Structure formats: structure tokens, C-alpha cells
Image (cartoon, rainbow, N blue to C red):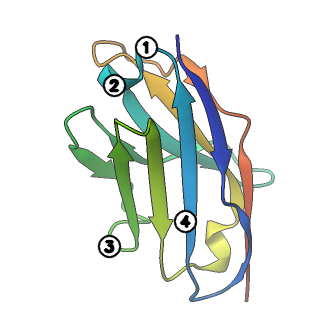
Amino acid sequence: QVHLVESGGGLVQAGGSLRLSCAASGRAFSSSIIGWFRQAPGKEREFVARISWSGGTIYAASVQGRFTISRDNAKRTVDLLMNSLKPEDTAVYYCAARNPTANEYDYWGQGTQVTVSS
């Protein structure tokens, strides 16, 4: 089992940066794939990025080149560095964990709000 807590959200102007952090507890963290998702008002939740236990990454096309996901297995954290933020990045951001052999993310954090002003 994995327990996740996000932090680092806030209000930033367009073009600015924010770093989100996901702190995890639970023995399964080191082997888990950790993903970041976001949900804007009135929209469905969408995938942002994910990182495997070995550091392999995948990004959504909308954030490729602007966002960087990283993890520190010793500290049990996964960060999402967001640069060149746009108003359309405004959303509640969630981190989630899944077993590498599973299709679904089983564990979710409570979310952190990111607001980008124009």
C-alpha cells in the first residue's frame, strides 16, 4: 500500500514556475510507477507525466519540454517541476501510484491547486 501527499501548489503568473512534490509512505513506493494527473474545472482528469522506479519518464504532449518529473527513492518523493506555465495549466494536480504490472493507478493523493494567471 502507498499513501501519497502532494504539496507545492499555488498562484503564479503565466511564464512562471512551480515545483510540486509528492511525498509517499509505504513499502511498495520504490517499485511503484508514480504519475501526475490534473483536473481543471468542468474537465475530465488528464495524464500529465509519470516516472518508473528506474527513472523512465513519459509526458503528455501538452507539457513536454516544459515540465520535468523526477523521483528520489531514498526520500520517497516525486517532484514535478513546471516551467513556462500557461493559464491552461490551471488545475488541481494529483499524484498517483500503481504497480508496474497494473493498468490502473490504485493510490491517489488529495490534490494540490495550481492557478496560473494571465
Residue 15 position by quadrant: bottom right
Identity, as a three-letter code, of the amino acid under mark 4: Arg
Looking at the image, residue 116 sits to the left or right of residue 16; the answer is right
Identity, as a three-letter code, of the amino acid under mark 2: Ser
Q: Which residue is mark 3?
A: 65
Instruction: Judge depth for marks 4 and 1 and give the one in front.
Output: 1
- What separation in Å lies between label 3 and label 2 (alpha carbons)? 26 Å
Is there a contact, CB below 8 Å, between mark 2 and mark 4? no
- For residue 49, above or below residue 25: below
Q: Residues within 10 Å of mark 1 (few under 14, many from 20)?
A: few
- For residue 44, above or below residue 11: above
Q: Which residue is mark 2?
A: 30
Instruction: Judge depth for marks 4 and 3 and give the one in front.
Output: 4
Q: Which residue is mark 4?
A: 19
- What separation in Å lies between label 4 and label 3 (alpha carbons)? 15 Å
**Numbered circle sitting on residue 27:** 1
